[in-house]
Image: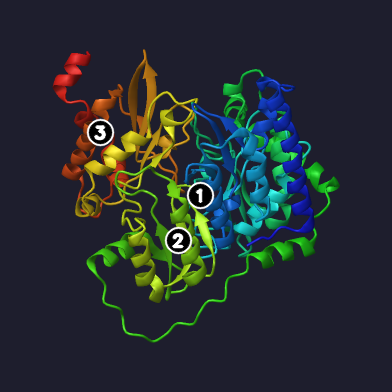
Amino acid sequence: MYDYTDFDREFVNARVEEFREQVERRLTGSLSEEEFLPLRLRNGLYLQLHAYMLRVAIPYGTLNSRKMRRLADVAEKWDKGYGHFTTRQNIQYNWPKLREVPDILLALADVGMHAIQTSGNCIRNVTADHFAGAAADEIEDPRPTAELIRQWSTDHPEFNWLPRKFKIGITGSPNDRAVTKSHDIGLRMVRNEAGEPGYEVCVGGGLGRTPMIAKVVRDFLPKEDLLPYLEAILQVYNLFGRRDNKFKARIKILVHETTIEVIRERVEAQFIENKRFMPTVSAELVREIEAAFAPPAFEPALDAPAPILSAGLRAWIDTNVSAHKLPHYGIATISLKPIGGTPGDATAEQMRLIADLAEEYAHDDIRISHEQNVILPHVPRRHLPAIYARLREAGLATANVGLISDIIACPGMDYCALATARSIPIAQEIAETFADIDRQRDIGPLKIKISGCINACGHHHVGHIGILGLDKAGVESYQVTLGGDGTETAAVGERAGPGFSYEEIVPAVERLIEAYLDNRLEPGEDFLAAYRRLGPEPFRAALYPREERSDAA
């Protein structure tokens, strides 16, 4: 992975000391909260319902054991013993004391981590496929590209105060595991007719109160043209994006109001200008970045008898281990969705265990997924029994990846000042309702995503079943959307109908599942495929039985 240079270290340490001085001024009252607000947001610090929240960047979701242990130290020393991994491949601490935040940032800087640009109207943490460098279907590891973008975008003087926040996602595979079409810019690695790798560039995606799927602005962009082209997109957005209404300030609104054809014309014209004046990225820098992401020293395949697998281990391998580009390796996903637990939470002890496992068995490589799980991307299959045994002892061996209890959920009204409803208890109750692993496996692949407000941090718009919590006259009301998809066949879910109360929403999900099981062609047809074949009507009929429809009318 990429290691800080002397310049990186000096830059991050200087930012920490600058923020320390700003915190001191806030504590002494020489800065009001209004004056402090933009300063703290530039350093990932939010004011939530009960306390400050610190969001720490995990660029493109990549960690090693040293960094994971430091995250555990922060949780233990300065928080309440746990952290929350997010859908942006970041980690959030919900209980830091303001005076201690600079000390936290200094401890993170010591291991090459920071909280810069994890908030504010700037280019946010670049996200990437969590299987990068390991996936069998990959054209090219996208992380060198993500690191190049990180270096270009950090403290970029022209893009530090954009009309609104700006998110970039990248995948190196034709199978999109990075939800790229829900980003302001989505990059997907493709090949041209000559077989050369480059990027399909999409622009104008986003969720929130106005969900939109990004549109293709360039079918193929040569790799050497990436930064001038990204610069052109940001320049067009910075110039033409709306600043009169923050709810209409994202680039998706600009694309919608002006059309993708107009945006393409403006971007291409600016791109030509940029090519004339922007310096070419040095080949030496590109080589240095690519070398930082060289594959590990994989062990050779060994002739050994197949191990005898317990039922629990077999279930875990079947659901949580994916194909690696080397047949004798696997990609192991550690679920942070124990039945009844808070999705995405990990204790300091669990973080240290994951660090130990990565160091001992998995080439010291760790990833965080946008689905709020942890991945060991390079695991020799002979080590899977040992890893499973230690995960089981720590309560981390839940065999539910991709199943109904593998739920994405934002913190909701338990923590967030913007939330209008609770998310975590709904996720917990759904998981407990479908706790039986055989029942989960019979239902098959299913993505439930829950947001506690219209900002959609839980990605509910692209859930096969999406749940949005709202406030209706002081009472929690949960809308259901159906048919969302965050992959290469991306789609925004359709609203099913009127909302449900807190007490009604989990039984409504149960009725949806029963309708799916009753109507699927065979066990091999998953929920999304059945929904696309049947349309919404059978599912709406299950959600709103005839007698309830009559009452509503």
Circle 3 sits on which residue?
506
Whether residue 128 is visible, yes or no, is no
Q: Answer above or below: position of 140 versus 297.
A: above
Q: Which mark is residue 178?
A: 1
Residue found at x 50% / y 79%: 299
Residue 242: x, y in percent? 66, 23
The mark nearer the N terminus, 1 or 3, is 1
Which quadrant, please, contains the N terminus?
bottom right
The amino acid pointed to by label 3 is Val
Q: Which mark is residue 353?
A: 2
Callout 1: helix, strand or loop?
loop
Q: Answer above or below: position of 136 versus 187.
A: below
Residue found at x 71% / y 21%: 29
The mark nearer the N terminus, 2 or 1, is 1
Q: Residue 473 carries which label?
A: none
Which numbered disc, 1 or 3, marks the residue closer to the eye?
A: 3
Residue 162: x, y in percent? 69, 31
The amino acid pointed to by label 1 is Ala
Residue found at x 63% / y 44%: 104
Residue 262: x, y in percent? 66, 32
The image shows a total of numbered marks equal to 3
Q: How crowded is mark 2: few (under 14 residues within 10 Å), some or many (20 or more)?
A: many
